[in-house]
Image: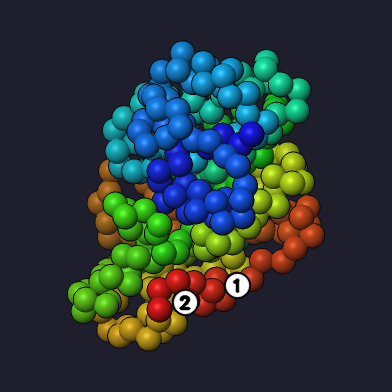
Amino acid sequence: MILISGSNGLLGTSLKYYFKKKKIDFKTMGSENSNFNGDIKNNFFVEKTIKRVSPKIFINLAALTNVDYCENNKNLTYKVNTEFPEIVLKKLKSNLNDYYFIQISTDMIYSGKGPHKEEHPKPINEYSKSKYETDKILLGYNAISLRTNFFGKSQNKSRLSFSDQIYKSCLNEKKIHLFRDVQFSPVSFNTINKVLNLIIKRKIFGIYNLGSKKGMSKENFGINLCKTLNLNTNYIKPNYLKKMNSLAKRPFDMRLDTSKLEKKLNLKFTNTENEIKSIKSDYL
């Protein structure tokens, strides 16, 4: 049995849709609209659910991800982003010999010049530090962490993805400001779902980057998306992280070196431009 936490988020909603299409059985746990409803900050609820379900595979998508909120709420951030997965790991290990834990981490663990390799993390805010602490913990278990960033058409009616926000703004002829000085290398929901399916079959352990090749600035991402979807690019306006007065520090370059995962899974990831093109049919 597969048990998913954080299944009502952007990636979780997409993954549920993908699993249903592939006829892959799974259950969910979370605060609401799940098979097992409860507070993941409640250790008793978490342990009781793991014992009851005895999942052989646990996919953790639950996290506090608002970077500025995390900066102001350190204890809560670590409770959700670090302590919760650690409790799950401990309970899985005590219940089963052949358990497998999949953690979705973040490209924000890196800062400095990319593309970044797995062995050179440099978290600079409470959010990324909490995710990095989890990465270190899971090395002692049958587990994998995927450091990634994703986009695509949201299956969640109440939440827009990064690409949704761009699409909606340009479609409605409204300006959207995107960072010219921030680079990343995200993958589509479709790519990450396929990789997760493959990883479930292979059961590889450790820490891996999952991203597209080359990468680009967030501004160029928006321009490429609009060109792909035949929208006017004039509504995309440049913004600069270096001029922002944010509460939490943010990295300028989160591009990922994916060679480790490519070698392990014997596959090749495409470049960011092609990842954008791959979602065209979802929007048009």
Establish if 194 lies above or below 49: below
Any part of residue 234 in sight: yes
Nearest the viewer among 91 and 63 is 91
Q: Residue at x 36, y 30 (%)?
A: 31
Residue 85, x across and y down, in percent: 54, 28
Say which quarter of the image contains residue 116: bottom right
Specify the amino acid type for callout 1: Asn
Number of residues whose C-alpha sits closer than 10 Å to that of mark 2, classed few (under 14), some (14–19) or many (20 or more): some
Which residue sits furthest top?
A: 44
Q: Residue at x 37, y 37 (%)?
A: 33
Establish if 263 lies above or below 57: below
Q: Distance from label 1 to label 2 (Cα)? A: 15 Å
Which residue position holds label 2? 280
Q: Residue at x 45, y 17 (%)?
A: 45
Specify the amino acid type for callout 2: Lys
Secondary structure at badge 2 equals helix
**What numbered label is drawn on residue 115?**
none
Query: Of marks 1 and 2, which one's residue comes earlier in the chain?
Result: 1
Which residue position holds label 1? 271
Which quadrant: the C terminus?
A: bottom left
Say which quarter of the image contains residue 69: top left
Nearest the viewer among 107 and 193 is 193
Say which quarter of the image contains residue 180: bottom left
Q: Residue at x 74, y 46 (%)?
A: 201
Establish if 25 lies above or below 99: below
Viewer-side label of 1, 2: 2
